[in-house]
Image (tube, rainbow, N blue to C red):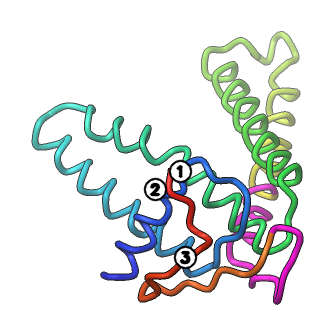
């Protein structure tokens, strides 16, 4: 439990920090902390019959989860521009997929217009593209750290017992 608390506090402490590195253990313990907090917020939301706790949790953790993932990718040697490109591709594939599904459900692409086959083709390409980009992104999150120093700094070993950390920036 100590690791989860430490990693989650570290992620929130570095809310806007996009430079530096984050170890694989540090990232995944923080994600586990987020999952536990979001489950608790979901239970509170169900008990109160409101979406406010879940919405607040999502808003609070959106930026630190993104910046922690970015630091995790830096730990593997991936550039910020490469990561942003993957996120943008994933976002675009998702929206085009959603648009194709909506057009097919609402009947905009009826077979009489000859658009149904095109919509299915676009849907298939976007679904495959989304899966490929998502797999690439997950591979980066599970990848081993680059040994030694890389262009983003020294490796940051995950050590919840260390009190004299100099790499943590308090905002």
| Number of residues whose C-alpha sits closer than 10 Å to that of mark 2, classed few (under 14), some (14–19) or many (20 or more) | many
| Number of residues whose C-alpha sits closer than 10 Å to that of mark 1, classed few (under 14), some (14–19) or many (20 or more) | many
* Disc number placed over residue 34 in the picture, else none: none
Residue located at (80% from left, 64% from top): 136
Labels 1 and 2 touching (C-beta < 8 A): yes
Q: Quadrant of residue 2?
A: bottom left
Q: Give the left or right position of residue 49, taking residue 91 as reference.
A: left
Read off the magenta span: 133-152
Give the Cα separation between the discs numbered 1 and 3: 14 Å
* Disc number placed over residue 26 in the picture, else none: 3
Residue located at (61% from left, 15% from top): 106
Labels 3 and 2: the sequence-earlier one? 2
Q: Give the left or right position of residue 47, taking residue 14 as reference.
A: left
Say if 140 sits above or below 60 in the image: below
Labels 3 and 2 touching (C-beta < 8 A): no
Labels 1 and 3: the sequence-earlier one? 1
Which one is closest to the eye, mark 1 or mark 3? Answer: 1
Residue located at (85% from left, 65% from top): 78
| Number of residues whose C-alpha sits closer than 10 Å to that of mark 3, classed few (under 14), some (14–19) or many (20 or more) | many
* Disc number placed over residue 15 in the picture, else none: 1
* Disc number placed over residue 12 in the picture, else none: 2
SS of the residue under disc 3: helix
């Amino acid at each position: 439990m100590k690791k989860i608390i430490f990693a989650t506090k570290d992620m929130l402490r570095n809310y806007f920090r996009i430079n530096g590195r984050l170890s694989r253990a540090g990232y995944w313990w923080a994600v586990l902390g987020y999952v536990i907090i979001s489950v608790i917020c979901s239970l509170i939301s169900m008990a109160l019959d409101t979406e406010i706790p879940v919405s607040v949790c999502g808003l609070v953790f959106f930026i630190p989860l993104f910046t922690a993932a970015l630091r995790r990718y830096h730990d593997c040697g991936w550039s910020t521009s490469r990561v942003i490109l993957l996120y943008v591709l994933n976002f675009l594939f998702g929206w085009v997929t959603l648009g194709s599904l909506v057009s097919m459900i609402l009947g905009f692409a009826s077979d009489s217009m000859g658009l149904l086959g095109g919509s299915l083709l676009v849907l298939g390409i976007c679904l495959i593209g989304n899966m490929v980009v998502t797999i690439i992104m997950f591979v980066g999150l599970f990848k081993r750290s680059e040994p030694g120093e890389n262009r983003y700094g020294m490796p940051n070993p995950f050590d919840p017992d260390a009190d004299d950390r100099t790499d943590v920036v308090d905002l």
